[in-house]
Every structure is written in C-alpha cells, then in structure tokens.
C-alpha cells in the first residue's frame, strides 16, 4: 500500500462523477494510502466550460489526475501537453440526449442536417455528438455551436437561439419537464489524465478506491440520491429562471441514480483508433502521435 501519497484530483460536479465524491467522503482513497485533495471551481465563476480552456490542469492548477471526455483527453494532452491519458471508460449508464422544442419541425435525427445543435465546445459533447450524428447525416452537414454549460444550453433552446441541444441527466429530466422533445441518445465516454508523477501503483490504488465507491452506489443507489441531486439544486441557484414553470419536486422524484462503472487502465489501441477518427475530421493536428498522448504505465 502507498504511504499517504498526496494527490490533487480535479473534480467535475457532474452526474457521471459521483463515485469520486463518494470515495472521498467514505475515506476509500485514504485507506489506499492516497491523501486526496478534491480541486473544484466555484460554479458561479464558470461562464463557458468547467475545465478551463486556456489553462493547464497539471501545470496551472497543479493537478495530478483529472477526468475528462475521452476525445478531449486526446486533444488536450496533445495540443496543451496537459498530462497523459492513464485510464478510460464509459463511467456510468448516463447517455447524452439531443433535445428540440415541442413545436419544432425536426422529427428525427436525420432532420438535423445543417441544423445548429448546441453543445459545450471542447468537451465530450463536441466529439460524441459529432460521432453520433454521423450515423444519421453526412459529416459536412453537422453544425455544432457552442452554447456553454447545461443551463446555458437549455436557455438557448428555450429562447430559440438554436433548434437542438445536447444534455445529460439530471438536466435531461429537467428538459422533459420543460416540455422539450427527445430526438437521439448516445453514450458518454470518459478518460482520466494524469501528470508525469502518476505511476502504475498510484493509478491502481486510485481505481480500487473508485471501484469501492461504485460498488456502494450500485448496491444501494437510493442512499446516494441526496448527493446526486445536489448538482441540480446548484443549477437552480445559478439559473433560477429555468425552474420558474417547473415542479421541482416532481423533477427530483423522477430522477434516478444511474449504474456506474469503474474506468480501466488506458486502452492504447482504442485511443489510437479515436485519434485516427479525429485526424480524419481535422479535429486535431495531423502529426498528433499516440506516444505523446498515452502514459507509458
């Protein structure tokens, strides 16, 4: 076992990262010899995306590990030299959903050709939405536009600034109660990036602690509903106008805690396939090399 190894862990306050919170609160990291410090940002100070776009986490924020979209982990490690990818996985049974307004003429995903779809650019949605839409429209007809955080995307759809947006629960359930219509669902894929100080022993200790939290949540999801719903309550404070015409109690009652999974040590071959896909679409420099993206663990 590691001996009180200090780890600064960047925490995303989103539904798919609940096990990170649980592992910290229940002391599972500590029991694996990890002195974990959860690094968080004040949601009120986040105007576009929670992971800073211009600052490095491993450098400017002195972070040792951070979760991020699988495709953005590839871009960020290559373009910004912000660590190396150490793990990846689906993380939770929490699909993204594309929504449109109830009065929209858009009836199916194929109707989204050349239609602006609101996402949070340089996050998982930019890549997963593009990949999912390619099953229904040609790549040159995909029009993704940046609309910011979940509440910002909901507001953009409500105000008619875009005709469709991507969301993930609990905001998908909120969108249902706001009367928006579901068009398409697709999986959410994540990665974990580590600094140069992360070795195999530390990664395995982290994943064991994370796995214990996953087992706890999956065994008794209702016990974690309060923690899970804190994100929705935080957004009610940030964007209260979105909740004016909604029965918040009904939204809370309908939301269920998803089933979580434990990420695996990085799959180099899988990420290399994703890198090829990104190069083919001009989403990353054509010289990007997997050796500079995946950690040599």
Image: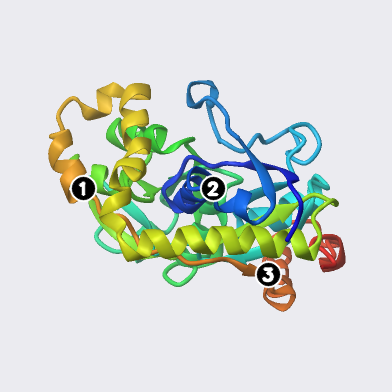
Q: From what the image shows, is residue 281 above or below residue 19?
A: below
| Residue wearing tag 3 | 265
Asked whether the residues under the numbered discs 1 and 3 touch, taking CB atoms below 8 Å apart as contact, a structural biologist would say no
Q: Residues within 10 Å of mark 3 (few under 14, many from 20)?
A: some
Asked which quadrant contains residue 265, the reply is bottom right
| Number of the label disc, if any, that sits on residue 27 | 2
**Is 20 or 90 nearer to us in this picture?**
20
Q: Position of residue 289 (x, y in %)?
A: 85, 65
Residue 8: give x, y in percent of width and height. Answer: 70, 40
In which quadrant of the rendered view does residue 287 lie? bottom right
User: Which corner quadrant holds the C terminus?
Assistant: bottom right
Q: Secondary structure at mark 2?
A: loop
Report the residue marked by disc 1.
176
Q: Quadrant of the N terminus?
A: bottom right
Mark toward the start of the polypeptide (3 vs 2): 2
- Structural crowding at the residue carrying mark 1, measured as other residues with C-alpha within 10 Å and reported as few (<14), some (14–19) or many (≥20): few
């Amino acid at each position: 076992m590691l001996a009180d190894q200090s780890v600064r862990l960047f925490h995303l306050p989103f539904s798919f990262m609940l096990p990170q919170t649980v592992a910290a609160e229940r002391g599972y990291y500590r029991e694996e010899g990890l002195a974990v410090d959860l690094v968080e940002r004040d949601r009120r100070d986040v105007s576009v995306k929670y992971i800073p776009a211009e600052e490095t986490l491993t450098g400017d924020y002195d972070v040792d590990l951070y979760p991020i979209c699988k495709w953005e982990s590839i871009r960020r490690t290559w373009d910004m030299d912000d660590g190396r990818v150490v793990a990846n996985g689906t993380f939770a049974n929490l699909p993204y959903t594309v929504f449109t307004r109830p009065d929209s003429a858009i009836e199916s995903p194929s109707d989204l050709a050349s239609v602006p779809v609101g996402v949070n650019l340089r996050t998982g949605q930019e890549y997963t939405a593009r990949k999912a839409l390619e099953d229904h429209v040609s790549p040159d007809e995909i029009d993704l536009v940046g609309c910011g955080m979940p509440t910002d995307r909901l507001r953009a759809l409500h105000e008619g600034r875009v005709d469709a947006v991507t969301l993930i629960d609990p905001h998908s359930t909120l969108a249902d109660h706001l009367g928006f219509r579901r068009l398409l669902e697709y999986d959410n894929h994540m990665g974990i990036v580590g600094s140069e100080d992360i070795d195999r022993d530390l990664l395995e200790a982290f994943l064991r602690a994370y796995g214990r939290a996953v087992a706890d949540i999956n065994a008794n999801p209702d016990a974690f509903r309060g923690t899970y719903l804190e994100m929705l309550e935080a957004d009610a404070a940030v964007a209260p106008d979105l909740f004016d015409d909604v029965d918040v109690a009904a939204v809370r009652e309908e939301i269920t805690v998803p089933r979580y999974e434990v990420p695996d040590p990085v799959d180099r071959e899988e990420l290399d396939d994703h890198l090829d896909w990104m190069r083919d679409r001009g989403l990353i420099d054509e010289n990007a090399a997997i050796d500079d993206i995946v950690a040599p663990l």
